[in-house]
Image (tube, helix red, strand yellow):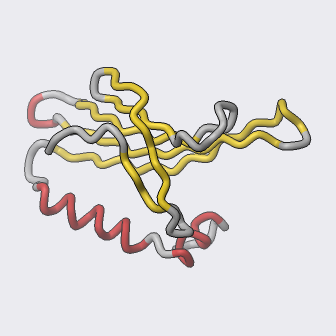
Amino acid sequence: MPFTPDVTIADFSAVDVDFNYISMVGTKVIRKDPDRDVDSPRVMTISHEVSGKGSAAVDRHLLRFDQTEVDDNDDTSIATGSAHIVLTVPRKNITVDIMKDLVTFVKNYLTEANIEKILNGEPG
């Protein structure tokens, strides 16, 4: 699959948000929403790494979104929220189809109601 520098993804309100390519270092790609101010960026990061050796080796793939907000009343008050998923794939026994099922479970579980339960610290 070819590399796609810029990505468009719908947000919760079904509004398309562009994430434009900023940099690639090794296996880490960073994209930013060009409509956000420099002091309150929204960033998409994808990275890949291998850990372990031999038959214990696993591939880890990270998809992460960060959004920074500055308090309108206090420019020194900055906070960043993050949402990310890490796919950990042992190099033996676990197939792409198994991983597709696991990711689909996560995707389908993340309904509006379940996201609110998680954010409220409730048991799922």
Residue beneath the point at 20% across and 58% down = 99
Taking the image as shown, residue 73 lies to the left or right of residue 18, namely right
Taking the image as shown, residue 14 lies to the left or right of residue 60, namely right
Looking at the image, residue 84 lies above or below residue 58: below
The percent position of residue 25, horizontal first and vertical second, equals 34, 21
Q: State which quadrant residue 78 falls in.
A: top right
The percent position of residue 11, horizontal first and vertical second, equals 51, 61
Residue beneath the point at 37% across and 73% down = 108
Could you say which is closer to the camera, residue 19 or residue 61?
19
Looking at the image, residue 6 lies above or below residue 8: above
Q: State which quadrant residue 29 falls in.
A: top left
> Which residue appears farthest toward the bottom when viewing the image?
113
Taking the image as shown, residue 29 lies to the left or right of residue 98, namely right
Looking at the image, residue 79 lies above or below residue 29: below
Residue beneath the point at 14% across and 45% down = 1
> Which residue appears farthest toward the front when viewing the image?
35
The percent position of residue 85, horizontal first and vertical second, equals 40, 51
The percent position of residue 12, horizontal first and vertical second, equals 54, 66
Taking the image as shown, residue 124 lies to the left or right of residue 72, namely left
Residue beneath the point at 33% across and 35% down = 47
Could you say which is closer to the camera, residue 64 or residue 12?
12
What number of labels is visible?
Answer: 0
> Which residue appears farthest toward the top when viewing the image?
25
